Image: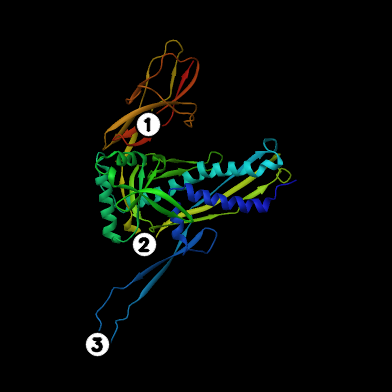
Amino acid sequence: MAINSIENAVRYAGELDKMFAQKSATGFFADNALATKFVGAKTVIIPDVDFQGLSDYDRDTGYTKGAITVSNTSYTMAMDRARSLQIDREDMDETGIANLAGKILGEYVRTKVVPECDAYVLSKLGGLALTRSNVIDGDIEKPYEALCKLINEVQSVVGYDEELVAFVDGYMFAALQNSTEISKMITVSDFKQGDISLKVKSINGVSLIPVVADRMKTAYTFNTGAAGGFAPIENAREIYMLVLPKTAAHLVKKTENMRIFTPEQNIDADAYKFDYRIYYDVFVNKSGLDSIWGWISPAVSITTQPADKTVNEGSISGSLTVSAQSEGALTYQWYQCQDENKTGAVKMAGKTSASMTIPTDLTEGEYFYFVKVIVDGAASTYSDVAVVTVS
């Protein structure tokens, strides 16, 4: 008996959208996109309304006429991403396909789709704040002071009755929670995200949304082809905090219905095939461009990457060295991994300087190393992988 492809495709798409709303740190921005209008596959129109201020009332001529300007701005969605997944027929029976497929697709959205969308949205908003110089200089030892500065900057633009959100990277979120100065000020409040109500921590009515550091960079490369995925670009800066009104950005997400093929329909393999595709982008109205403020790490650049080495077994000598520059204080941590893609990276104990002595007990083969360059004990960037060949 074949799986009911159409019915299940619609059901899976709906469930995946719910999971996106639950797991995404930025998913609530989709609530602001209700007024958008699709005019093409990748183009949307978002209205931006502006008014003239009040004028004196004249007892002879009455009211002064004022204009309402509605600018229907067209935006092109940049992110058109997709992946085709297959589950071999032998890995499931007829009664188990719905459950197993649901688990696999749900895990794919949780571990691949949501992180990429969050990274893209936050990098675009953080990049906007940086471009418009809407940034503050904070003290790494005083995160609450920096948060207050950001809140004040945003409120000076939008007023005091707007609901604000603060995206906070993991390091700063931990610092805020551990601060004896404000521990009693942190409360738990309801946070509406689509049809879902979440519990979040807040300070002075501002919802705190913690985000892992890997999704809090100013720019990313979104890979194409078989590799897929995303990674920070070289010299990308870390976003420590980002404060903005909850309504400041529009996340326009258009998920195509899932395409599902049974093994009988799949011409490439004896497997169930699931095609997942998503259009999405985030836009900010002109009136909201200066309502987004951030605290961003000092820039760091790796000026000299660690070079590949060839050594002889039994008489290994030499070291791997990296050079980096930043306005902040730099520290280092070396890692060993399985390949040039940094797969299975493991921290190397005691290897915390710019130069790492190559282990002398290596046997014949190839070994892969890279270094994490850390700024002010918080932000970081990674070197390329150096290959040590033992012959």
- Image point 49% across, 51% down: which residue? 21
Mark drawn on residue 372: 1
Does 386 sit above or below residue 262?
Answer: above
At label 1, which amino acid type do we have? Lys
Mark drawn on residue 59: 3
Secondary structure under the numbered disc 3 in the rendered image:
loop
Does 267 sit above or below residue 193?
Answer: above
Q: Are marks 2 and 1 in contact (CB under 8 Å)?
A: no
At label 2, which amino acid type do we have? Lys
Residue 118, position in %: x, y? Answer: 44, 47
- Image point 35% across, 36% down: which residue? 380
Mark drawn on residue 343: none
Residue 122, position in %: x, y? Answer: 40, 48
Please name which of the two marks, 2 or 3, marks the residue nearer to the observer.
Answer: 3
Labels 2 and 1: the sequence-earlier one = 2
Q: From the viewer's perspective, tell me whether residue 315 is left or right of residue 18.
A: left
Labels 2 and 3: the sequence-earlier one = 3
Front residue of 164 and 182: 182
At label 3, which amino acid type do we have? Arg
Badge 2, how many Cα within 10 Å: few under 14, some, many 20+?
Answer: few
Front residue of 373 and 194: 194
Labels 3 and 1: the sequence-earlier one = 3
Quadrant for residue 346, please give it: top left
Give the labeled residue for mark 2.
Answer: 286
Secondary structure under the numbered disc 1 in the rendered image:
strand
Front residue of 157 and 110: 110
